[in-house]
Image (cartoon, helix red, strand yellow):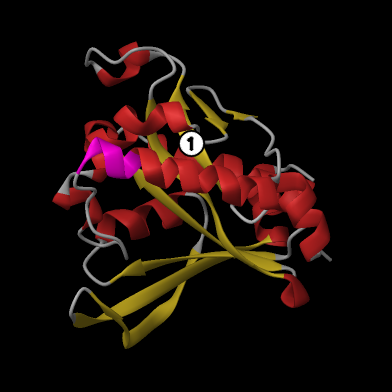
Amino acid sequence: MVNRDEIQRIFRDPPVLHTRRLMLRRMLKSDYKDMYEYASQSVVTRYLLWDEHDSEAYTYKYLQYIQSRYRLGEFYDWAVVVKDPSESGQPFSKGKMIGTCGFTRFHGEHNAAEIGYVLSPAWWGKGIAPEAVSAVLRFGFTELGLHRIEARYMAGNSASRRVMEKVGMTYEGMARESMFVKGEFVSVGTCSILRDEWIGRTGVR
């Protein structure tokens, strides 16, 4: 069973995760320009709990704050970085941060966790989000020994649900108007995958 002390120890210096096209690493203050590019877009934040960033200075301060959370082992998100900029068909530099992916919370007593992800619109529809999520699932099941990993999405965000289903998650239902976000009640859907299901899908133990 995963415990708080172990989670904190691991995420004080989160390990780097690699996929074919991506590297998932600790978020850095120097990522502020890359993060601001997508975090300032309303199309990105439409179905998120937070509003778009209003300046690069705000993004820099946010990332500065995140460093303090890492030091405490209380932040579980990775920067999603591209290895090969030619994948996008756009003039991106190698090592550019194009989003985030990681755990939003752990439920230690249930050996479970929730994940979340955000991606720059320039990379939507290229299979990047499922690739990043798959890396986090692998880490959660093989390194942390989790039993269940879930993800949630706001009603209307069908693209996010498709990501969940592409990595093998099962739709569990919609909690009707269960959250008050940005001045309105929103319904929230949940998808999940269990460790045995993930092993059956990937063959990895």
Q: Secondary structure at mark 1?
A: strand
Observer-nearest of 132 and 24: 24
Which portion, as a residue range, is magenta?
55-59
Q: Is residue 116 above or below residue 190?
A: above
Query: Residue 3, image x and y in percent?
Result: 81, 65
Quadrant location of the N terminus in the rendered image: bottom right
Q: Residue at x 36, y 47 (%)?
A: 118
Q: Residue at x 33, y 42 (%)?
A: 59
Query: Residue 155, image x and y in percent?
Result: 26, 72
Q: Is residue 82 above or below residue 54?
A: above
Observer-nearest of 91 and 159: 91
Note whether residue 33 is visible.
Answer: yes
Tag 1: residue type? Ala
Q: Is residue 72 above or below residue 2?
A: above
- Disc 1 marks which residue? 79
Quarter of the image for residue 81 reads top left
Q: Residue at x 19, y 47 (%)?
A: 54
Note whether residue 144 is visible.
Answer: no
Quarter of the image for residue 63 reads top left
**Number of numbered markers:** 1
Q: Residue at x 27, y 44 (%)?
A: 39
Observer-nearest of 137 and 95: 95
Observer-nearest of 106 and 132: 106
Q: Is residue 14 magenta?
A: no
Query: Residue 82, image x and y in percent?
Result: 43, 22
* Dot 1 crowding, Cα within 10 Å, few <14, some 14–19, many 20+: many
Q: Which SS type dominates the magenta stretch?
A: helix
Query: Residue 9, image x and y in percent?
Result: 79, 49
